[in-house]
Image (cartoon, rainbow, N blue to C red):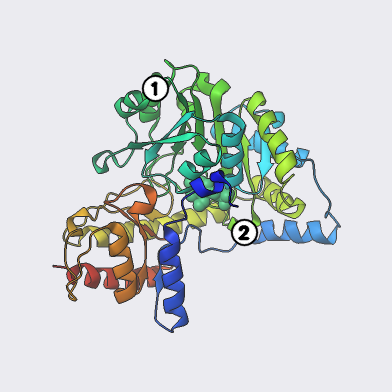
Amino acid sequence: MISKRAQLLSPSETLKITALAKQLAREGKSVISLSAGEPDFKTPPHICNAAIEAITDGFHGYTMNTGMPELREAISDKLKRENQLDFPADQIVLSNGAKQSIGFTILATIDPEDEVLIPAPYWVSYPEMVKLAVGVPVIVKTTFENSYKLSAKQLEKAITKKTKALILCSPSNPTGSCYTRSELEELADVLKKYPDILIFSDEIYEYIVFENEHVSILNAAPELADRTVIINGFSKGFAMTGWRLGYMAGPKRIADAVAKIQSQETSAPSSISQKAGLAAYTGSMKPVEEMRKAFQKRRDYIVGELSSIPGIKCFKPAGAFYVFPDIHHHLGKKTPDGATIETSTDLAMYLLEKFGVAAVPGDAFGEPSGLRLSYAASLENLEEAVKRLKAGFDSLS
Ligand SMILES: Cc1ncc(COP(=O)(O)O)c(C=O)c1O
């Protein structure tokens, strides 16, 4: 009764943690959630006002399948102004969130048995989206020592005759790592030897960077433009997760194929959200900068505290709002009840059940030695969470 395609998908490993966190909160227990993948800020008022105006002006109808022409132009201008990238409006397709843009880009390009390289730790949806397209996700393990970034050597080794695409995510969910221009140049040098490999570059966290300017692989290697798709959206930088607005910008042939799929599956995103997106890309960036600064303060705090816990290794991530400490030293240890913490999932469940801190186990992202903590939470909550985490790790022997 259920299709083979649906059966191929793994249920989200994060669900167990989320379900338990909800149950504990319902029982009246104090739970601090560091598992959220969304900013804890409100969407800036000028963006909300643009949406309210759209409603009162009666802007309720369908827009073009690929999105409002003004917004596609505004995105084209933004990519030129901020990213030095050339994507005319007809190479841009708006969607109901970056997630849809990635999914449809994969559906538009991946045939059964095509291999898609996914560096681990990865954002949970990439391998599942490839499976939905009946492609083959090829997980390429990276190392803590290299801040979980793919090296040119690892890339070269993973490429086969069947490799059709590489997915890059910078700044990264779940590690917060950002590729530098020279690291991207090295990856690009490998990719230039394989002209049939497509590159999907997920840049949804581009505004949340702390050390350097955001760099896209296309800045490092503009000659890859005829086979690179940039994925971006409004969710993270503008605190607009619920508005469901994202886009892909890529070669015309891929944009057209994505648009064709979208026209049969969902059509354009909400007209009201699109007006909000237009205000975001044409209005003041001050609120984005304020959120970025707040994230930076929290990052510095949490990295400092986590690094002081014995047996935890934690590098300072250059972007996004996650830290991904290496907790492998604690695997195999016993709880006071005599249970063994075998996996990062066991550890996350233990920290939640006994200490009321919700984090996402590295297992969910293909890296069993990690634990993802989101610092999209108030400093007050982070301070309390740190106290509990210290007690939690201290209780293991
Ligand atoms: C790396 C990455 N890409 C894409 C998305 C999806 O973003 P959107 O809300 O625009 O669908 C997320 C959201 O968690 C993400 O972390």
Q: Is mark 1 within 8 Å of ligand 1?
A: no
Q: Is residue 376 visible?
A: no
Q: Which residue is mark 2?
A: 242
Q: Which residue is mark 1?
A: 160
Closest to the observer, 212 or 370: 370
Q: Quadrant of the C terminus?
A: bottom left
Instruction: List x then y, in percent, for residue 142.
Output: 30, 38
Q: Is residue 352 left or right of residue 308?
A: right
State whether residue 323 is above or below residue 156: below
Three-letter amino acid code at the position of disc 2: Gly
Label 1 sits on a secondary structure element that is loop
Query: In this view, which residue lies farthest toward the left?
Result: 397
Instruction: List x then y, in percent, for residue 190.
Output: 38, 20
At horizontal 43% and vertical 57% (from top left) the residue drawn is 295
Label 2 sits on a secondary structure element that is helix
Closest to the observer, 205 or 74: 205
State whether residue 273 is above or below residue 86: below
User: Residue 226 appears in which quarter of the rendering?
Assistant: top right
At horizontal 53% and vertical 36% (from top left) the residue drawn is 134
Q: Is residue 321 left or right of residue 247?
A: left
Q: Is residue 280 visible?
A: yes
Q: Is mark 2 within 8 Å of ligand 1?
A: no
Query: In this view, which residue lies farthest toward the front?
Result: 1
Instruction: List x then y, in percent, for residue 303.
Output: 29, 57
Number of numbered tags placed on the structure image: 2
Q: Is residue 222 left or right of residue 100?
A: left
Q: Which mark sits nearer the N-terminus, 2 or 1?
A: 1
Instruction: List x then y, in percent, for residue 289.
Output: 51, 52
State whether residue 88 is above or below residue 137: above
At horizontal 77% and vertical 38% (from top left) the residue drawn is 69
